[in-house]
Amino acid sequence: MNMSMLRAVVATIVMGLSSLAWAGPGPEDLTKQLTEEVLSAVAADAEIKAGDTEKAIQLVEARVLPHFNFEHMTALAVGRDWRAASPEQRMALTEQFRTLLVRTYSNALTQYTNQSIHFKPFRGRPDDEDALVRTEIRQPGAQAIQMDFNLERVGADWKVYDVVVAGVSLVTNYRASFAQQVRQSGIDGLIESLKAKNAEKVAAQS
């Protein structure tokens, strides 16, 4: 067997093992598929491009939400106060924070014009439990913006638990304000504050 054929055989075996280890789309493949599907759907939908936030929310709920771990995201945002929350409070926090992020993300989609996402080389391994997918948002005439996705393995799937834009974590960006709210009015006060913010967003986007 010559060296070229040997390398081809080894590559085939490695790819096969990698596919088995990932047991589905790997973190990079999942992120690419997710972003391409969403941006293609936005580009083809005149109502979203015209600013229809509710239509954007429907798109996010159908295409994006199944691939995000909102409980982990909420735990990271709440920080050490998460440990003191009851199961019912954790459920309420997750629901309200999920609603806040969905509306924020959906509103951002209505501002989409002709940006493109460039994926940087991925350095993950098949046995990893945590992965970082690094990308750049590019737009003609503007500086590229770094956007990184943190994913974790959940069973046979991969779930996003944080997005870091220009060095700022989407999740932990809320931690200081959440901690202050808990100090002032407790976990229930934070839940009510999130409900109020979500109600304001609904009113503003109506």
Image (cartoon, rainbow, N blue to C red):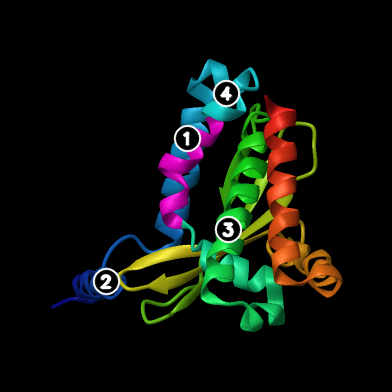
Kindly identify the amino acid type of the residue bearing the numbered disc 2: Ala
Look at the numbered discs 4 and 3 and tell me whether their residues touch, using CB distance below 8 Å. no
Q: CA distance from mark 1 to mark 2?
A: 38 Å
At label 3, the amino acid type is: Lys
> Which amino acid lies under the numbered mark 1 shown in the image of this protein?
Leu
Residue identified by numbered label 4: 48
Residue 114 location in percent, x, y? 64, 28
How many residues crowd around disc 1 within 10 Å: few (fewer than 14), some, or many (20 or more)? some
Q: Residue at x 71, y 54 (%)?
A: 194
Left or right, 81 with reference to 102: right
First along the sequence among labels 1 and 2: 2
The residues tagged by marks 1 and 4 sit, at their Cα atoms, a distance apart of: 9 Å
| For discs 3 and 1, the disc positioned in front in the rendered view | 1
Location of residue 109 with respect to 79 vertically, above or below: above
Q: Earlier in the sequence, mark 1 or mark 4?
A: 4
- In the rendering, which numbered label is found on residue 120? 3
- Is residue 43 found left or right of 15 in the rendered image? right
Q: Which residues are magenta?
A: 56-67
Determine the residue positioned at 20% across, 76% down: 6
Q: Residue at x 61, y 21 (%)?
A: 49
Instruction: Give the CA separation, mark 3 to mark 1.
Output: 26 Å
Residue at image mark 1: 59
Q: Are marks 1 and 4 in contact (CB under 8 Å)?
A: yes
Name the residue that disc number 2 marks.
Answer: 11
Q: CA distance from mark 4 to mark 3?
A: 28 Å
Report the residue at 76% width, 72% height from top.
Answer: 186
Label 1: element kind: helix
- Element on which disc 4 rests: helix
